Image (tube, rainbow, N blue to C red):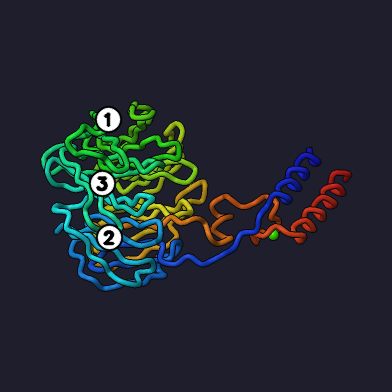
């Protein structure tokens, strides 16, 4: 058994590649009466810029770390990574954006409460290149998520229709690819697992939230597992790197971790206030903004067995703050180990596999040998 174990270590050792490290700054973003950014694991490490965005209704982070902001006048703006560089204002989308997502080519999909629920696609210059009307009810809020091939999942909140659309639809008068109609509505968020399973957060009634799955097979949507839980208000869902699901109830302020395969509960935390928005960082930690009269951000570290309050920041004097996080690849060695992706051959945990690690293993082998004969 021991030989097999060390043989695996040796193979891992030989296959390993060096990992370079670079610091990540400005990974979490929050809207108050200005845009603020934070280190991904410490809300006390804050920078901010003053710009009058009015009431921010949606926020997203691009693949390059730029941040896209929408406000309740239909204005769209982008700031470069690190909140530096040029603030770019785009074409007005003509309604309140309720959700933003960024496709791999840099195009932005905005769910907009206009017509009977719409989404618009903007190019990287923030000009509208497509408008899709008639997804749900009159002025329905639309929540957006993207499949791995950039196809668009658009959920009409009050109507309960969850649409699948091509990454760039052809003709808005043509029927979209397909849709699924939910009897558990309003639908308040959608997210996607790595195999393109759609996760839906909805409010079945005043006190029960629903989390459920929709399988995607080509253009066909099929409803899968359902999990009900206590907690109403807006239901927020998001997916971790290992496909587990984080669910939060806006009204009770409880955040749950659900197993990604069967939706069973793992653990939860009571945050103490109603939740205005939720985001995940790339270590699987949960960031929430609370409506407590001041507007408070809280970061709950996901330890693997609990959510633990790691840092918080209050005094923003702004309710209904939106939060977003940049999810780049894990770039520091500490992050890699914390997220559970450390290389088992890297005995010294410096993310470089070299002769020093081999020395540690050789020592452990000898120590193990001596102990086993005692
Ligand atoms: Ca090492």
Q: Residue at (79%, 41%) from the top-left corner? A: 2
Residue 275: in sight, yes or no? Answer: no
3 vs 1, front mark: 1
Q: CA distance from mark 2 to mark 1?
A: 29 Å
Residue 16: in sight, yes or no? Answer: yes
* In the image: residue 121, left or right of residue 196: left
Residue at the extreme front: 170
The residue labelled by disc 2 is 125
* In the image: residue 71, left or right of residue 212: left
Q: Residues within 10 Å of mark 1 (few under 14, many from 20)?
A: few
Q: CA distance from mark 3 to mark 1?
A: 32 Å
The residue labelled by disc 3 is 251
Q: Quadrant of the C terminus?
A: top right
Q: Quadrant of the N terminus?
A: top right
- Return the x and y of residue 62 as percentages of the image width and height: 36, 57
CB of residue at label 3: within 8 Å of ligand 1? Answer: no
Q: Residue at (29%, 63%) from the top-left corner? A: 78
Disc 1 element? strand
Nearer to us in this view, 273 or 13? 13
Tell which circle, 3 or 1, labels the residue nearer the N-terminal end.
1
Q: Which mark is residue 178?
A: 1
- Return the x and y of residue 355 as percentages of the image width and height: 77, 60
Q: Residue at (30%, 72%) from the top-left corner? A: 49
Ligand 1 is found in the corner quadrant, namely bottom right
2 vs 1, front mark: 2
User: In the rendered image, which quarter is residue 287 located in?
Assistant: bottom left
Q: Residue at (70%, 57%) from the top-left corner? A: 353
């Amino acid at each position: 058994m021991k030989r097999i174990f060390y043989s695996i270590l040796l193979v891992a050792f030989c296959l390993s590649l060096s990992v370079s490290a670079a610091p990540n700054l400005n990974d979490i973003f929050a809207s108050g009466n200005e845009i603020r950014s934070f280190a991904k694991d410490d809300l006390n490490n804050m920078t901010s810029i003053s710009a009058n965005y009015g009431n921010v209704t949606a926020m997203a982070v691009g693949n390059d770390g730029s941040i896209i902001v929408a406000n309740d006048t239909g204005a769209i703006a982008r700031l470069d990574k690190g909140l530096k560089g040029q603030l770019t204002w785009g074409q007005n989308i003509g309604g309140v954006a309720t959700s933003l997502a960024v496709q791999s080519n840099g195009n932005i999909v905005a769910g907009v409460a206009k017509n009977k629920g719409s989404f618009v696609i903007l190019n990287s210059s923030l000009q509208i290149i497509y408008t899709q009307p008639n997804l749900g009810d009159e002025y329905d809020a639309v929540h957006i998520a993207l499949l791995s091939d950039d196809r668009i999942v658009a959920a009409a909140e009050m109507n309960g229709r969850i649409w699948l659309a091509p990454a760039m639809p052809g003709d808005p008068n043509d029927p979209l690819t397909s849709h699924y109609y939910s009897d558990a509505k309003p639908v308040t968020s959608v997210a996607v697992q790595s195999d393109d399973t759609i996760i839906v957060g909805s409010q079945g009634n005043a006190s029960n939230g629903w989390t459920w799955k929709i399988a995607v097979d080509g253009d066909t949507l099929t409803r899968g597992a359902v999990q009900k839980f206590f907690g109403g208000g807006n239901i927020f869902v998001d997916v971790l790197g290992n496909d587990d699901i984080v669910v939060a109830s806006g009204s009770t302020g409880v955040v749950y971790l659900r197993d990604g395969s069967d939706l069973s509960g793992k653990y939860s935390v009571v945050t103490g206030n109603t939740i205005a928005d939720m985001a995940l960082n790339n270590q699987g930690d949960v960031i929430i903004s609370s409506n407590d009269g001041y507007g408070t951000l809280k970061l709950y570290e996901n330890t693997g067995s609990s959510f633990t309050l790691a840092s918080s920041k209050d005094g923003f004097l702004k309710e209904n703050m939106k939060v977003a996080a940049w999810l780049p690849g894990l770039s520091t060695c500490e992050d890699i180990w914390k997220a559970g992706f450390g290389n088992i051959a890297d005995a010294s945990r410096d993310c470089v596999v070299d002769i020093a690690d081999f020395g540690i293993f050789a020592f452990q082998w000898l120590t193990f040998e001596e102990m086993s004969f005692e």
